[in-house]
Structures are given as structure tokens and as C-alpha cells.
Image (spheres, helix red, strand yellow):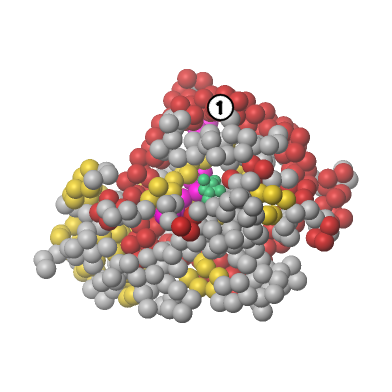
Amino acid sequence: MLPVSVSVTADPAFVVGPVRPRTFGSFVEHLGRCVYTGIHDPGHPTADADGFRGDVVDLVRELGVTTVRYPGGNFVSGYRWEDGVGPVDQRPRRLDLAWHSIEPNLVGVDEFMRWCAKAGVEPMMAINLGTRGVEEALALLEYCNAPAGTAWADARKANAAADPYKVTMWCLGNEMDGPWQTGHKTALEYGRLAAETARVMRQLDPGLELVVCGSSSRSMPTFGAWEHTVLTEAYDQVDLVSAHAYYYEEDGDLTSFLASSVDMDRFVDDVAATADAVRAAGKHSKRIHISFDEWNVWYQRRAESRLPSGDDWPVAPVLLEDRYNVADAVVVGNLLISLLRHTDRVHAASLAQLVNVIAPIMTEPGGRAWRQTTFHPFALTARHAAGEVLRLAVHAPQQETERFGEVPVLDAVATHDPETGDVVLFAVNRSLTEPVALDVDLRGFPGLRVVEAVTLANPDHTWSATADDATSVLPRPNTTAAVADGRAAAQLPPVSWSMLRLARV
Ligand code: AHR
């Protein structure tokens, strides 16, 4: 089969912005088995004194996750954070209406902070603006960030930690436009509450970075108008607006699915344009950035995502445990390309979620942990993207998609580290059938050589990892990659994600 020719030009002058470590965040919600039997499993042979699994912490470190959003998600909108502090055996069991489950409160804010320290990640806390409000948000902030000497700070000292946790990133509620959200609100109701909560939170701690809820999806009828109203109310009080996107799934139209990042590109552009319109109308000088704090492939219609019902209120049920295949991993890699390409506006992002629940890491209760296919493009991008993000000039044939119209057959982004001179190219071949013959003009970076080239692909793109076989399909060395006369060349198979690392050697 004749490959499709794609030419790409990279130049050190085409800088979008810095590679931001917070682009590689993730999310731990009290949902299904994410916390219980996911990160927390006291009976597990690798568990520490808090009951946290050491094997999972090792995988989280290998994944390269930087921030972890907690404790929800939909869960947070009915959560009383006070239930999760103090002696574990005295904590109440509560109904969790969001996921029709029982929350045993064995893990709360103090345990989570210790887990973050162990995993080497920055906590990103979400507050409940569904059933609760300003007072409870202030109490939690005092508990986390105030020095000892007042009631909640002293409670933290007595329970767990003399020193404040100094949590910088806070989400002002979760998906507050969603009718499924406990205590959901109109844009005006929420915008006023978020603005006032943010204002007083800053009185307690001026150094906070605050994320206001954008619309819960680009497909919501409220999308756009919601962001406009909320930001009109809260512009001066917040730093970022959230974006959530999950409607990426292979529903029989693989060609459209492989172009999912086109939707993410448009999503970011739409939110940025709306925020800038509010900026212009309000004569504000600062810019609002985007926290893409829930994104992933999610097969919402599958049985795995059906909630318990009736009198069935389980603790940590199997929920949203999608098994990801090779095509899913290619799309996840491509969504990361999109997030990097928008590093000027996307200042934080969270792959939702981290363990068991639509996650790159899976566990057996008390048993094995393994990497899903989606683990690999995330880990490699988080480890090797460095320095500045470069916009590339890509000349690629277009392919027709049902959902997004014509899209280029190849999508790519590159990073350049001005200190080392290293260039890393991330690329996706979206064709179902044709290999791509990639030609990259690197004349702006003299002396580069290939130090590593890997490709994730498989003749059967439906292959998924299991506990018994998580390694048959991995990113493999791409032996076709080479540099000659200032040009890099590589063959990229159909339905593939690749990384090409170039350095002066
Ligand atoms: O990540 C799963 C759920 O998806 C989250 O709880 C919610 O915020 C979103 O709708």
C-alpha cells in the first residue's frame, strides 16, 4: 500500500507558550472503585499505614501525573467534608446520591493530602456549591490553609497536620449547569455564588488560583451563554474557567472518533472567545484561562456506566470501568496534542479519572494493578514534552468525517527545550487504512538526531490490556525514523500515535 505523504515544518520561532506541568493532571473522585480498592485498599500487600496501595502510587508516579483534582465530580455537590476528618472509626456512613452508593468516609481530606505527598502530586480541591455555600467553603479552606490558632486550623493540627497544606488550586463547585448535579443552578445564581465564595476565600488566602465552573459540556444547551453570564458575574474574582469533555467514543464511526481532537480544539477556541468577549465588555485587563479539568474517552452508554438503583446502595461498586483499546489510546494521545497546542489558554487539565473509573490504571481488590492502553501516550507525553510548545505547519491530505467534516489525516504538535535544544514531536495518523510517510523540515534546528522514536499501533486496534496481558501491545521502537539534511522522516502506520525525540548528539 502506498503511504500518504505529509510534510511538517517546525521552527523555533513558532512558540505558542510554555509546556505547563499542570497540563498533565488527573482526577480522583469518590466514585465506584477509584478511591476504595483503587488508591486505598488497606488489605493489599503493598498498603501503607493509611491503607494506600504502594503499587498504585508507583504507577501514578510512572504516569507522570502532576495535579490531582479531588473529591469530585458529581460527588462533591452533596459532600460534607467534615465527615471525612477525625478518628476514622467515628466517621459517618452517608448516602451518595450522585452515584447511588454508600460513602464510608474512610478517606477524607487529611488522608488525601498524605496520599498526594506520597504520590508526588499537587492537590486541586473542589468545594461543594451544590448543597452548601460560602461558610462551608471557608471552613474547609481554613482547615487546609490557615496556620494553627483558630478552630478549624486547630482541628487539622489535632487530627493530622500541624502545618497548613497550602492548597493553591480550588474548583468552585462542579458542573453546576447540569440537571443531574445536586443543587444545580442557573448561570446567574451560580455566577453570583461563585463570585462571592471566591471573594471571601481570597480574603483568607490571597494566593489562591480559583476555577469557576464552565458549562459541563460543549453539547449542553447552556454552553456559551453559561460561560458568558458566569464570567460576567465572577470575572475579577476567578482565574480559570473549567471545560469538561467526554463525548469521545467509538460508536461504529471510527473515522470520526479518530478526529475527536478537532472537537477539543473548537471547544477551547469557543471558551477562550467567550471569556475574551466578557473581558472586552467589562474593560478587564487580565485574561481568564481554561482548566480542562475533566477529559477522556468514555463509553457512557455501556453497562459499566449504569448506576445501582432502588434499595441497592453499595460501597465502591464497579462503575464506569471502561476497558480501553488501541484506538482509544490513539485518541487520548491526540487529545493531549490538542491540549498542548492550546497551552496559551489551557493552563491546567485533568485526565478523568486516575484509577479504575474511566482510568489509565486498573486494579483488582487486594490483587494486581495494570496499565491500560491509554496509560502509554499520557506517560510518554508527560515525561518528554519540555520547554516550549511549537505550532507546526502541517500539509496533509484531508479525510472526510461524518462528525467533523474534512480533517487532516495527520495531527501533530512539537515541543522545543531552548536549554537543551531537544525537540519532541507527537503525531497521530488518523487514517484507518493508509500509512503516513512523514517528512519534517527541521532546518531551524541544526544538528538534531533521532534519540528515540516509538509508535503505538496494532493490526487489531480493538486490543485491550487485561491483568493477565497488559504488555502484548505497547509503544514499540519505530525503526523507520531518521534525520538527514535537516529533515526527519518516519513511516506512521494507520490508527497510530507516535513520539519522535530529537537531540543534538
Ligand atoms: O468523571 C465522571 C463524572 O463526569 C464526574 O463526576 C462529573 O463531573 C462528570 O459529569
372 vs 65, left or right, is left
313 vs 393, left or right, is right
Q: Which residue is mark 1?
A: 186
402 vs 311, left or right, is left
Magenta stretch: residue 410 in it?
A: no
Residue 145, relative to residue 364: is it above or below? above
The kind of residue tagged 1 is: Thr
Q: Residue at x 63, y 46 (%)?
A: 97
Magenta stretch: residue 292 in it?
A: yes
* Residue 459 at x, y percent in the picture: 26, 71
Can I make out residue 446 in this image?
no
Residue 12, relative to residue 373: is it above or below? above
Q: Residue at x 32, y 67 (%)?
A: 462
Q: Badge 1: how crowded within 10 Å, few (<14), some, or many (20+)? A: some
**Residue range of the region highlighted in magenta in the rendering:** 285-299
Residue 213: quarter of image = top right
Residue 402: quarter of image = top left
**Main secondary structure of the magenta stretch:** strand
Task: Pick the residue in front: 170 or 306.
Answer: 306
Name the quarter where the C terminus is drawn: bottom left
Name the quarter where the N terminus is drawn: bottom left
Q: Residue at x 68, y 63 (%)?
A: 115
Can I make out residue 325 in this image?
yes
Task: Pick the residue in front: 74 or 373.
Answer: 74
* Residue 66 at x, y percent in the picture: 56, 58
